[in-house]
Amino acid sequence: MSPKSAPDIVLIGAGIMSATLGVLLKELQPELTIEIFERLDIIAGESSDAWNNAGTGHSAFCELNYTPEKENGDIEINKAIKIAESFEVTKQFWSFLVQQGCIKSPETFIQSVPHMSFVWGENNVEYLKKRQQMLESNNLFKGMQYSEDPAVLKQWIPLVMEGRGADEKVAATRMESGTDINFGALTRALIGYLEKQDGVQVHLKHEVRDLDQEEDGRWYLKVKNLETGKKRKLHTRFVFIGAGGGSLPLLEKSDIPEGKGFGGFPVSGQWLICKNPAIVEKHAAKVYGKASVGAPPMSVPHLDTRVIDGKKALLFGPYAGFSTKFLKNGSWLDLPRSIKFNNIRPMLAAGLDNLPLTKYLIDQVRQSPEDRMEALQEFLPQAKIEDWELEVAGQRVQVIKKHPEHVGILEFGTEVVSAADGSIAALLGASPGASTAVSIMLELLQRCFPNKLATPLWQNKLKQMIPSYGQKLAESPTLLEHVRSWANAVLELKK
């Protein structure tokens, strides 16, 4: 059966990653034809949905897992710097889109919310103090405040300090320029903009069932309309698999050598959501603590002010769990079906190397409501169970990949996997994900469109969209101050 169409670009999954790549490509080369396929009946229904992620503009201001303490007591900040730079790049791209009218109003998706780290215990206090001193010396983190003074902390986070003993050793850092982001609203705005462009089609309730590369280099896709049952076949020169937890099975079906040996470890999450408006109004920050031993990064405990569709909310969590599903709306068979001959050894090796994680997840699954409240009360000593209710959060699939020494390792970040010919790419993994989407997609352009990226046309356009493109913000304080001030003004954020 001959294909009905042959778009230049196919994007699988209608989340923040596909939306970002689609807009970038359409801005760089307006004549491109693009088709987006989403298995759900809504855009941004999985990981990008506001209730399925922390909504944190991950800038490494507050996330302590990005600044681990070395054995010699030093603080490693390279990852934090990279993430902070990436988020500034993302903000520039969003600012360009707001100025161009592609996104109508920034307050529909981004708000200023201070980012804080909060710790207790002498060793943790000493760690946080060293961390603040290390980070504050870098311009990306200029203005980070630190305090051990209970009077100051009561001003910053009154709820967190209520009921604490006067002799308890506590400390916090605070960045006023933190943000809360509704990635669902942003994704819908980006895809809504794309749909208005010539040559772009979005197909909801459509699932890509198979894909094969033909001798001429093009990809042959089989797609099913889940509403009507009708099947469709098409050719394309480029495929991006941005289907969240659904990316790994499709990468395996592509059969590219670069995708061999990858596995996935699913981690589910839950939030406690405050339903007492009086309590919600008394807290105005994202407050991150230290993770439990063995906990994955997505399970770092935090108490978050959220602004979702104009309404303020207060969330605590996430509580991790284990599910064999790769998507919140996935199948219990996702994990077993993903195990192949080429990835079983890396997956087993990663499992043996991460026994503390396995124990942690088992303990989390077995938690009672009282256990969850106990964790919350470490942050909010006077929290009452009747003020909070449990909600299911998003599903994440952590990357497992081959390793020369350990056979297989578990990665707690994002991984772009692309074919040598640049005709297909997939994004695996989770945090910091959405906040660094633009930098991730720029890396993808470098891998998959190197010749076009080298042209003056694409270079000039990228510098219009991202004024700092090609430069290191951590090493350019004047440039950082310029682009940060501009982006914060356009996005109506605190400077």
Image: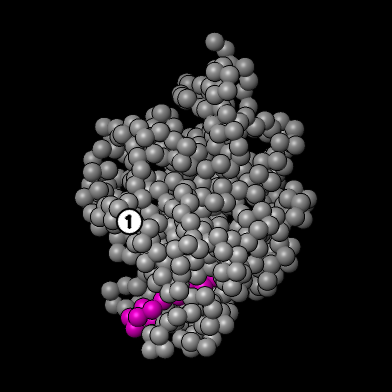
Q: Which residue is depicted at the point 40% across and 45% down?
A: 397
Quadrant location, the C terminus: bottom right
Q: Is residue 429 left or right of residue 443?
A: left
Quarter of the image where one finds residue 277 = bottom right
Quadrant location, the N terminus: top right
Q: Which residue is depicted at the point 50% across and 70% down?
A: 287
In the foreground, 55 or 311: 311
Q: Above or below — where is 426 with respect to 170?
A: above
User: Where is residue 36 drawn, in percent x and y?
Assistant: 60, 33
Q: Which residue is depicted at the point 38% across and 79% down?
A: 120
Q: Is residue 51 magenta?
A: no
The amino acid on which the numbered mark 1 sits, given as a three-letter code, is: Gln
In the foreground, 364 or 288: 364
- Check disc 1: other Cα within 10 Å, few if <14, some if 14-19, many if 20+: some
Q: Which residue is depicted at the point 34% across and 37% down?
A: 335
The magenta-colored residue range is 115-125
User: Where is residue 6 drawn, in percent x and y?
Assistant: 62, 23
In the foreground, 328 or 219: 328
